[in-house]
């Protein structure tokens, strides 16, 4: 039996920031839009603080927190693994919960191998 391949992971630095945000806000969610500026960066909200659009894709969870991406962005990046990371600085807009910490979430991508792509976890679509 083949191992199911995750579409999503997080660095230790990102997990450290998530722990801090959990302590302050409780349950979280992530959303990455396909637009410009801050929309291309993953945004972190309190769970329920953002509503995915119809047919947006939930590609996985980080510590149980859903990670949603824009439906069009998913079509473009469905062949890629997302690694959530964090960097020092303020992202544009400042709507994401890590902004007051002087941090900005970012995603690093890598293409799946053919074997990985054939064994990916399914995505959940919003209705």
Image: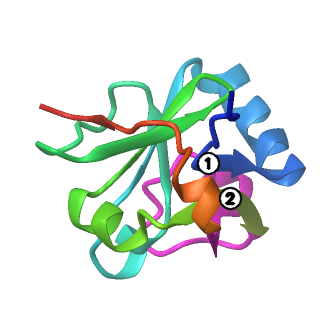
Q: Is 53 situated left or right of 62 in this image?
A: left
Residue found at the far front of this picture:
1
- Considering depth in this image, is 62 or 42 the residue closer to the camera? 62
Mark 1 residue crowding within 10 angstroms, few (<14) / some (14–19) / many (20+): some
Q: Which mark is residue 8?
A: 1
Residue drawn at x 56%, y 44% is 119
Give residue 68's position: percent from left, percent from top: 39, 45
The question of residue 103 being in magenta is answered with yes
Mark 2, residue position = 83
Residue 17 sits in which quadrant?
top right
**Residue 76 position (above or below residue 61):** below
The question of residue 90 being in magenta is answered with yes
Question: Which region is colored magenta?
Answer: 88-111
- Considering depth in this image, is 80 or 56 the residue closer to the camera? 80
Give residue 59's position: percent from left, percent from top: 45, 43
Q: What element carries label 2?
A: strand
């Amino acid at each position: 039996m083949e191992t199911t391949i995750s579409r999503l992971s997080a660095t230790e630095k990102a997990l450290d920031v998530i722990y801090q945000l959990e302590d302050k806000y409780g349950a979280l969610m992530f959303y990455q839009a396909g637009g410009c500026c801050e929309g291309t960066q993953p945004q972190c909200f309190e769970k329920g603080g953002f509503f995915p659009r119809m047919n947006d894709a939930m590609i996985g969870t980080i510590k149980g927190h859903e990670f949603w991406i824009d439906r069009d962005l998913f079509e473009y990046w469905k062949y890629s693994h997302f690694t959530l990371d964090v960097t020092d600085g303020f992202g544009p807009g400042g709507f994401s919960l890590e902004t007051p910490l002087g941090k900005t979430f970012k995603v690093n991508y890598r293409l799946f191998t053919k074997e990985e792509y054939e064994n990916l976890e399914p995505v959940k679509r919003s209705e």
